[in-house]
């Protein structure tokens, strides 16, 4: 069995599945996580007396958890069993295109794995600004990927597209860890935002999105976190509105913008997660940015937060 090695979210990951859009990492014996594809048939569910069952995303994802394991089952035909910090078993059906499997692995499966380990990731994209990083967070559809796509088109360096992993140094300095060198683009964003690099995008089957490989625009090293901008939409404003958050508002914004926050209960990490959010809130600048319901406003957001609509050196 041939194994491929990748660096994803700062971890060295070995797998027998070749990820079609990622470049292999250097060979090493120091593997943090081994992901095994289609070597064993996974059970339909966890049905012991300690198991709990959850459904998400309009019943397209089932999750079972007990004291030892997490079992995910996607309706498109992917199952994943996480029963330790260093091994995941994945079972695929329906002859799914490799890019679809890659997409589910990089975000859905590894996102839950990170949460189970007690890691903290924000649902948002991270852009390099000078020698630091800023995160644009928010729920799906609020404009995070549009901002990432616009920054990509303009030549900014990007650390992450949708999952921004944060760590605190021993000196309590927050840093963002790069994820992987891909961003996703919706057809609407492609038509309205991408002007210079349309030839670099390729379709992802089934999920109706495109991907762009970042190449030299991927920043591979962690950066100090300068600020988190929490995006929202309202029909009560007619222009961009920015507000600096404080106190409990900052903690709530981090909790509500945690990647896969609806799975915290399933992973029994709630107390640790809250403590991290409280500590991060006390040392991080967090802002809310509200835009009108109609319009993209990505140019204004970039100019306001990154200092210019032109990439910074």
Image: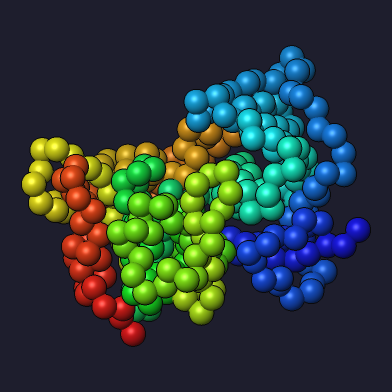
- Is there any visible trace of residue 48 in the rendered image? yes
Task: Look at the picture and state if 292 lies above or below 305.
Answer: above
What percent of the width, then of the height, locates residue 250? 29, 46
Task: Look at the picture and state if 8 lies above or below 37.
Answer: below
86 with respect to 236 (left or right): right
Task: Look at the picture and state if 231 lies above or below 180.
Answer: above
Q: Which residue does the image show at 70% across and 44% down from the upper left? A: 96
- Is there any visible trace of residue 105 in the rendered image? no
Which residue reaches farthest left?
Answer: 238
- Choose between 212 and 239: the one closer to the eye: 212
Q: Give residue 30's quadrant in the image.
A: bottom right
Which residue reaches farthest right?
Answer: 1
Quadrant housing the C terminus: bottom left
Q: Which residue does the image show at 44% across and 40% down from the upper left? A: 274
Q: Which residue does the image show at 26% across and 70% down from the upper left? A: 306
Q: Which residue does the image show at 58% across and 49% down from the upper left? A: 205
Which colouring convention does the figure follow?
rainbow
Q: Give residue 172's quadrant in the image.
A: bottom left
């Amino acid at each position: 069995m041939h194994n491929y090695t990748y660096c994803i979210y700062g971890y060295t990951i070995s797998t027998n599945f070749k990820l079609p859009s990622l470049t292999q990492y250097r060979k090493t014996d120091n593997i943090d996580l081994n992901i095994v594809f289609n070597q064993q048939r996974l059970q339909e569910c966890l049905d012991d007396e300690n198991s709990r069952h959850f459904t998400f995303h309009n019943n397209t994802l089932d999750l079972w958890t007990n004291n030892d394991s997490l079992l995910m089952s996607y309706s498109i035909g992917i199952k994943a069993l996480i029963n330790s910090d260093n091994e995941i078993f994945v079972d695929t059906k329906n002859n799914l295109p490799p890019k679809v499997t890659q997409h589910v692995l990089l975000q859905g499966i590894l996102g839950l794995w990170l949460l189970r380990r007690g890691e903290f990731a924000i649902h948002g994209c991270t852009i390099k600004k000078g020698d630091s990083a800023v995160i644009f967070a928010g729920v799906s559809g609020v404009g995070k990927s549009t901002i990432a796509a616009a920054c990509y088109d303009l030549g900014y360096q990007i650390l992450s597209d949708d999952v921004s992993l944060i760590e605190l140094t021993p000196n309590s300095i927050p840093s963002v860890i790069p994820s992987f060198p891909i961003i996703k683009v919706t057809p609407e964003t492609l038509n309205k935002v991408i002007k210079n690099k349309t030839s670099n995008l390729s379709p992802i089957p089934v999920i109706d999105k495109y991907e762009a490989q970042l190449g030299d625009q991927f920043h591979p090293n962690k950066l100090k976190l300068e600020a988190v901008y929490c995006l929202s939409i309202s029909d009560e404003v007619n222009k961009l509105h920015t507000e600096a958050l404080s106190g409990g508002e900052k903690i709530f914004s981090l909790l509500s913008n945690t990647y896969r926050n609806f799975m915290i209960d399933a992973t029994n990490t709630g107390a640790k997660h809250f403590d991290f959010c409280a500590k991060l809130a006390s040392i991080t600048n967090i802002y809310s940015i509200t835009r009108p319901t109609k319009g993209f406003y990505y140019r204004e957001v970039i100019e306001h937060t990154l200092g210019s609509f032109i990439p910074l050196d």
